[in-house]
Amino acid sequence: MSRFKELQKNLFGGSQSNARQFGMIFTLVAIVLLFQIWTGGLTLTSSNLIAVVSQYSYILILAIGMLMVIVAGHIDLSVGSVAAFTGIVVAKAMQEYDLPWPLGILLGLLVGLAIGAWQGFWVAYVGIPAFIVTLAGMLLFRGGNQFIGNADTIPVPEGFREIGAGFLPEVGPETGFNNLTLLLGLVACAAVVWREWKGRQTRQEMNAEVAPLWVNGIRLAIMLGVIVFATLRFAGGRVGTSLPISGIILIVLVLAYSHYTNNTIGGRHIYAVGGNSRAAELSGVKLRRVNFLVMTNMSVLAALAGMIFVARSTASGPQDGLSWELDAIAAVFIGGAAVSGGLGTISGSIVGGLVMALLNNGLQLEGVGSDRVQMIKGLVLLLAVAFDVYSKSQGRFSIIGTLSRPFRREEPAAPAEPTSTASDPQKAPVAT
């Protein structure tokens, strides 16, 4: 096998590599470089990258929950209204009842939990399709937002604003960078090196096929390069800015949910339900419990996203959360999730969300009007998925297929009937 084939096998979806991570990094880098050229170098400035994370972190948080909902075979149209309803309840409680802001955050999470349990009950135990339940929820909680807030804007206290508009503080000696951001980058680099070494050692102990050492070196160099570059950008912003607190919340959620979906029984049950709910139920999976949990989890994350947005905006208003569900759904599908359920990754959804965020940001930097931005985003979503479907039908390289390959199970081909396949070419087995 040539070195190019060896690199392609181990770097893009082979059994020895984590294609979900590295393929997505390459895709994202290509998109960033494209807009870097179009905007004359503005995309990768520290101030712009910080602004992108601060402005779109709530959509990325929604994408995490939406991925699990879609993988389980459902859809949630209520997330924007749930976020808006939670924001107005928390803002009202802190303003009128002097509720301390830490308790306000806890109240918001409990509101999201209650809403999720309500919607999850109708989906899991009554059997109403999630599309209908969440469509009703979208109307119900949008009206609830306007009823509680009287269609007014309600400000939130200073401490509460930190979760949406705050940054890592400046500590330690003067280095020209934010020291805490540098420390986080250093920890991330060490974690990547340890994970790569540990994965190679584990495969050797299991007598499994191990990628050539030079492939590990290339993969590691790419990861470390991305981390170092991002760390220096976020740490090198103007004084008082650095990695946003909302970005840290997002990172924690991505790590936690990636571990849950990839390495736990509960996470595997979600994929099993989305792949074939009947077979999963016959295998012992608690179908109702899985459906209840994914719907409840979605509303909790929607509540958190709503509070982060309100904190960044410094007030809750009647227009909060409009069309958020569409952005979250678009992020998940661009990131490689299957419409029918059963396929998708947390990291893929984050990349899909970043694609939409950078597209929106780049067009704004070029002065494109909001009307044309919406039209372009819609076309990009449609064409991206259409191109991928066409590529798969032609047996060519498929971006979404590559990103989702680690979750596909190869099934043995059904035996062909010699009489029918010879006489009818349309019934001949098709290679996949």
Image: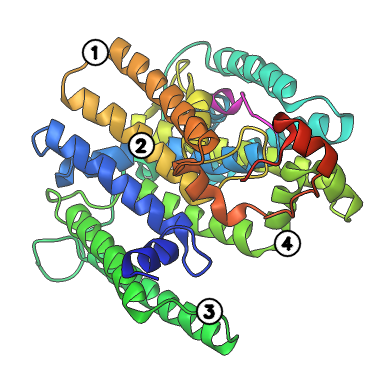
Instruction: Tell me the residue that label 1 is attached to.
Output: 369
Q: Secondary structure at mark 2?
A: helix
Instruction: Tell me the residue that label 4 is attached to.
Output: 265
Residue 344 is situated, as x and y percent measured from the top left of the image, at 57, 45
Q: What's under tag 3, amino acid-wise? A: Glu
Choose top left, top right, bottom left or bottom right for residue 423. top right
Q: Secondary structure at mark 3?
A: loop
Looking at this view, name the residue that lies furthest to the bottom: 205
Q: What's under tag 2, amino acid-wise? A: Val
Q: Is 79 colored magenta in this rendering?
A: yes
Residue 199 is situated, as x and y percent measured from the top left of the image, at 49, 78
How many angstroms separate mark 4 from mark 3 (CA)? 26 Å
Can you see residue 98?
no
**Left or right: residue 275 compared with residue 229:** right
How many angstroms separate mark 4 from mark 1 (CA)? 47 Å
How many angstroms separate mark 1 from mark 2 (CA)? 19 Å
**Which contiguous range is marked in magenta?**
74-82
Q: What's under tag 4, amino acid-wise? A: Ile
Q: Is residue 291 above or below residue 415?
A: above
Instruction: Tell me the residue that label 3 is attached to.
Output: 209
How many angstroms separate mark 1 from mark 3 (CA)? 53 Å
Which label was assigned to residue 108?
A: none
Instruction: Tell me the residue that label 2 is attached to.
Output: 355
* Marks 4 and 2, the one that precedes in the sequence: 4
How many angstroms separate mark 4 from mark 2 (CA)? 30 Å
Q: Residue at x 58, y 28 (%)?
A: 79
Of residues 368 and 303, the one drawn nearer to the viewer in this rendering: 368
* Marks 4 and 1, the one that precedes in the sequence: 4
